[in-house]
Image (cartoon, grey):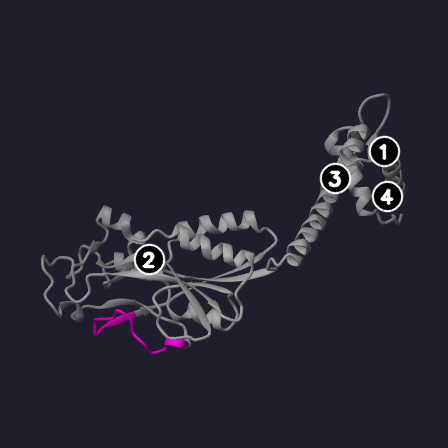
Amino acid sequence: MDVGQPTLDQLRLFLAVVDEGSFNAAARKLGRAISVVSYGIVTLESQLGVTLFDREGSKKPVLTPAGKAMLAQARAVADDVDALLSGVRNFNQGLEAELGLAIDVMFPTPLLAAILREFQELYPTVLLRLHVEALGAIAGLVVDGQAQLGIGGPELVALPDLEREAIGEVDLVPVAAPGHPLAQMDSIPPGEARKHRQLVLTDRSKLTEGRDFSVFSASTWRLGDLGARHALMREGIGWGNMPMHLIESDLASGRLKRLTIPEWPGMAYRFHALWRRDCPGGPAQNWLREAFRQRLVPS
């Protein structure tokens, strides 16, 4: 048997009766006459060809099996419509419909997760597209328009199309496994680090293609994944520079050892927020930029 198409108002009347427990309470909540609520439910039942509530005697209306079967779908439809209307209102007020965010792989992951969790709660209608890259790839994504906001490391190239704002830093230090030759030296002489394989984070961006950053060894393995480089260092395959927040537990447990290399004692890896000058951004982008600036405590 074919069924009629219920209206959104009828579904809201149905949900109000369920949530409030009676026709009277639903009418009070919605500011409608009880006769309107009752008529809406009767009409809905007639259109669907089912009885939604058991109204026998003077007891409160109880969902029938058909009503229980319909409840979850009715609530989903109402929620989807509410989300649609909220998104339209936000869009009309200048809130972005979607936002691309490019994050440097060196950025502390727990802090990123905390910021994005709060962002999701504050801006549930904004579709966030997250990219995690390294070095010049962050700026490249912003320039190409794939990301509206980038959180990148030290400025590598001059890009006149981009605005940038310093937001904080993390410590970058040279480390190796305790069994590595460099880690076993009490004092590393100048030039010694160049004789040992250095594990280098490679840059997939054409903006800085072919350029080396903080590379001292003549022998290098280049990896595009920070996690893989971390794992190889712990196996003693090479030495390299790692963000302090990522290796604190390794240093405490002795799985890695900080190296005192005369040419490279370490550095402050400074992060910048990047965005196109011709796309200043809306409320969601501005909130993210401020959140990163306030919460990334300088080391």
Which structural element holds mark 1? loop
Label 1 CA crowd tier, 10 Å (few <14, some 14–19, many 20+):
few
Q: Do the residues labelled 3 and 4 touch (CB within 8 Å)?
A: no
Disc with the residue nearer the chain's start (3 vs 1): 1
Which residue in the structure is indicated by mark 2?
A: 169
Task: State the CA–CA distance, disc 3 to disc 4.
Answer: 13 Å
Q: How many labels does the image show?
A: 4
Q: Which of 212 and 67 is in front in this view?
A: 212
Label 2 CA crowd tier, 10 Å (few <14, some 14–19, many 20+):
many
Residue occupying the point 67% across, 58% down: 92
Q: Which of marks 1 and 4 is in front?
A: 1
Q: Are marks 1 and 4 in contact (CB under 8 Å)?
A: no
Furthest residue toward top = 58
Disc with the residue nearer the chain's start (3 vs 2): 3
Residue 33 disc label: 1
Task: State the CA–CA distance, disc 2 to disc 1.
Answer: 61 Å
Question: Where residue 58 sits: x, y (%)?
Answer: 85, 21
Residue 34, above or below 233: above
Q: Which of marks 3 and 2 is in front?
A: 2
Question: Where residue 83 sits: x, y (%)?
Answer: 67, 50
Which structural element holds mark 2? strand
Residue 207, above or below 65: below
Amino acid under label 3? Leu
Task: State the CA–CA distance, disc 3 to disc 1.
Answer: 23 Å
* In the displayed structure image, the side of residue 64 where residue 150 appears, left or right: left
Amino acid under label 1? Ala
Residue occupying the point 14% across, 64% down: 262
Q: Nearer the viewer, mark 3 or mark 1?
A: 1
Q: What stretch is highlighted in magenta?
A: 207-221
Which residue in the structure is indicated by mark 4?
A: 48
Amino acid under label 2? Glu
Which residue in the structure is indicated by mark 3?
A: 71
